[in-house]
Each structure stands twice: as C-alpha cells, then as structure tokens.
Image: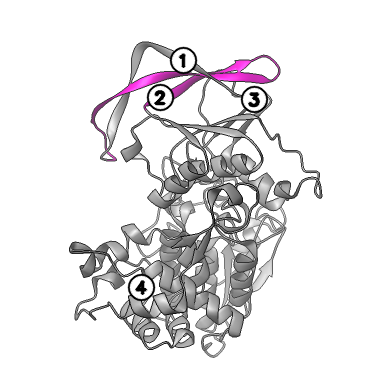
Amino acid sequence: MRRRAAEDRIHDFLEVDLGMTEEDAVSEANRCIGCKKPLCIHGCPVQIDIPAFIARVAEGDFIGAAEKIKEQNMLPAICGRVCPQETQCESTCILSKKGEAIPIGQLERLVADIERKRGPKLPDIGKPTGKNVAVVGSGPAGLTASAELAKEGHHVTLYESLHMPGGVLTYGIPAFRLPKDIVNFEILQVLSLGVELRTNHFIGRSLHVHELLRYDAVVLATGAGLPYFMDIEGENLNGVFSANEFLTRINLMHADEFPTYDTPVLKGKNVVVVGGGNVAMDAARVARRLGGEVTLVYRRREEDLPARLAEVHHAQEEGISFVFCAAPIRILGEKSLTGIECIRMRMDILDDSGRPNPIPIEGSLFTIEADVVIGAVGQGPNPVLLREIEGLTLGKSGNVVTLETGETSLPHVFAAGDAATGAATVILAMGTGKRAAQTVNQRLKGGSG
C-alpha cells in the first residue's frame, strides 16, 4: 500500500497509509480464481461474502462491492484499515500458498471510501417487531450488534458512558491509523438504521440496573477498558501513564492539537513504552509525533511481537528504538521520574501462547533515561457495571462467561466483544457482536436460538 514518507508523517496525525488506486484494485481483484469452496469467508469473523465483493471490484463496480460488504458489515472503512486480514481472510486465500494473497483489506477500504464520497446506501430494514433491546457500549461489538438488531426491525437503544460513541475506535486507535471523520461517518450509518444513541449514560448510575433489565433483551458490550499495570516500584510517579489513559487524552481531549486545546498530557523528551502489542505501537508512535525520542521495551524477541507486522515496520520507519529481551523492574525518580531500570531476559521453553517464556538474567541490569513511561501491558473488562448485575457469571479475569452464541447465565442478557472474550481485535469483537445479535433476534422472534 502507498504511504506517506516517515520524515513527513511524524510531525502530524494525518493518515499514514494512502490506499490503492482504482486501477490497481481492478487488477488485483482479477487475480481472484473464484474458489468453489472459498476459505476466505471462513477466515472472516463477520462472514463477508468476499468472493462476491471481489468479483464486483474486478468489474469496476465499486459501489456494488461496498453494498455487498455492508450486507454483513456496517463498518467497512474501519475494518479495511485496522483489521489484521493477513492473519484472517488473507491467510486462508489459496493464492497465498505459492505467492501473494488477494489484498482483501485494501480492496475493502477502497470500495468503502468510494461509496462514502459518492453517497452511501443503507441496507434494507425489516418491519418493526415492537421489541426493545438495550446495547451497553458503543465500541465495535456494540455497534455491530446494534446494526444487526436494527436491520431485523427491533428498536435498539445504544448506551455509551463517554460523551462520544465508538469505544476503542474513537478513544484508542490514533487518527493516523484510523481517521476520526471515517469513524464518525460509519457510526452515523449505524445510527441511521434507527438506533437510538444515549451518550453520557453510565449504567448503574445514570440508568439503574433494574431499569436496564426491563428491556426485552440486553447486550453487554462494555469492552476492555481496565488497564493492567506493571506492578513495579515507582509506577505512581508523575510522568507514568497507562496506554489507555495516554491514548484517551490524545483522542478524546485533543491533546494532539496543542496549543489549540490545552489538555494536560506530559510530552516527554525521552519516552519509554513497555509492551509489544498494537496498543504499544500506537502509544509509541503518538509519543513520537509529540516530539519525543521513543524507546519501546519488550520482554521477548522481535519475532515474538504480537503487534501487526505493518505497525512494527511503520514504528521502525518513524524512528522508534526497540529494546528486545528486556523487562522493567523499577521506575527511577522521586517526585518525577528520571529513568527506568530493566533487566535482560533469556528465552526459555514455549508457554501457553506458543512463545518462549522469558527468564531474567542475573546481573544484567541496565537503565534507560526517561521522563515519561507508558505501560502497554494489556487490559481487561471493567468490572464496575458487570458486578452490579445480580446473577451474571463472571470469569477469573472479570469477563462475562458466555456460550459461543453470546448467551450468559441470565436468560435475556447477552455479552459480546472484549467484555466476554478479554482484549482482542476490532474484527473479533465485531464477530461476537454479530453472533450475539443473531441469537437475540432468534429469541425475540420466537426461535430456539
């Protein structure tokens, strides 16, 4: 994919990737061999009819291709940008066995962008059923569940605790990866299906749990907004952030638009980010754009990084320094931090994730100078609401225990996204939101589910 030069993009929050041309899209789509058993569909968590939309791209029918995608996915421009197609639909493409897979994500992004500019068309909506469904949380799982239920004719009320909808799409992923005008546009498309949005509503406070449970069905899609911490000395010093807080301040409080918005966020000269996932890459690349010299510390090897390869490559292009096989043990300083002390790690036998288990090497301590440290070591479901729902079974990590259908221990309460699975990708959250909505629809229309 075409992208902006690193020396230009580190000074702003404009989108890095520029997408593909219409001519390239048609050429790539014509490489599709039209498998009789298209594995790419099974590799897609929301089950888009990928061969059908690619066939329309091959004919130059970009609007028809977008409409085909939106039969199953109301967030195509978002998914085309942030979904890890390389490990899902594209990894199952038969062409990848001996060459390059069809660039499904790039094609999805292109046709969604074209449709947005030319004027989108909404999918058909079923006759009103008279049933009322509450969806709690307006991130990717909640938006998907809301869209699917609204298309079936149910009245959906979408509750969001913050003042802007979108969840991680709005407050987590930086604008240079996912422009906010695109997020806002696709959210508006979901609302145009008849979904009623209520922001600034914290369930249990703004709306009592008993009132929530009066709905014909409830879908809990509250995400994984609870940051995990490093649990090391000095973590409470000024200048230490969780990645959640850091990215939220940037995205929702306009800290990237300083001095237009005087939002309190410390823009360090020497920034250390701890972690190796996509959130860590986002935090590091944001800190770089705020003028910092950024070092990312990861306890395993480069080949073990869980972040998308493209995001790692972009971070390296933008001047992020990587320190592998190292882990923080102490943050240095008194009132404000001065550095972070780390220890080298050696790789031992594989753990449950299939990656080597890192073991500290005695006598290998070293220090990295820092005035800002950002911890990106994971996050989990926020238990504040979930614990207030009597009879709702929770797992050890605070997630809602569900069946594959999204059913919980309560008969008319369902759960989807990171609240059920723990932290995962946008598209996986959407897939669980869709499955939960399908189950809700079957129940409300008298099916067995």
Instruction: Tell me the quadrant of the picture where the N terminus can be found.
Output: bottom left
185 or 145, nearer to the observer: 185
Q: Amino acid at mark 2?
A: Ala
- In this rendered view, identify the residue nearer to me: 97 or 200: 97
The reply to whether the C-beta atoms of the residues labelled 2 and 3 are less than 8 Å apart is no
Magenta residues: mostly which secondary structure?
strand
- Which of label 1 and label 4 is nearer to you? 1
Q: Which residue is mark 1?
A: 366
What whole-number distance in Å separates the C-alpha atoms at marks 2 and 3? 19 Å
Q: Are marks 1 and 3 in contact (CB under 8 Å)?
A: no
Label 3 to label 4: alpha-carbon separation: 46 Å
Residue in view at x 32 percent, y 61 percent: 88
Residue drawn at x 40%, y 75% as measured from the top left: 24
Of the image marks 1 and 2, the number of the one nearer the N terminus: 2
Look at the image and give the residue range highlighted in magenta.
Answer: 325-353
Figure quadrant of the C terminus? bottom left
Task: Residue under label 4, please give it.
Answer: 47
Q: CA distance from mark 2 to mark 4?
A: 40 Å
Q: Residue furthest top?
A: 363
Q: The residue tagged with tag 2: helix, strand or loop?
A: strand
Q: Which residue is mark 2?
A: 326
Q: Quadrant of residue 50?
A: bottom left
Q: Quadrant of residue 210?
A: bottom right
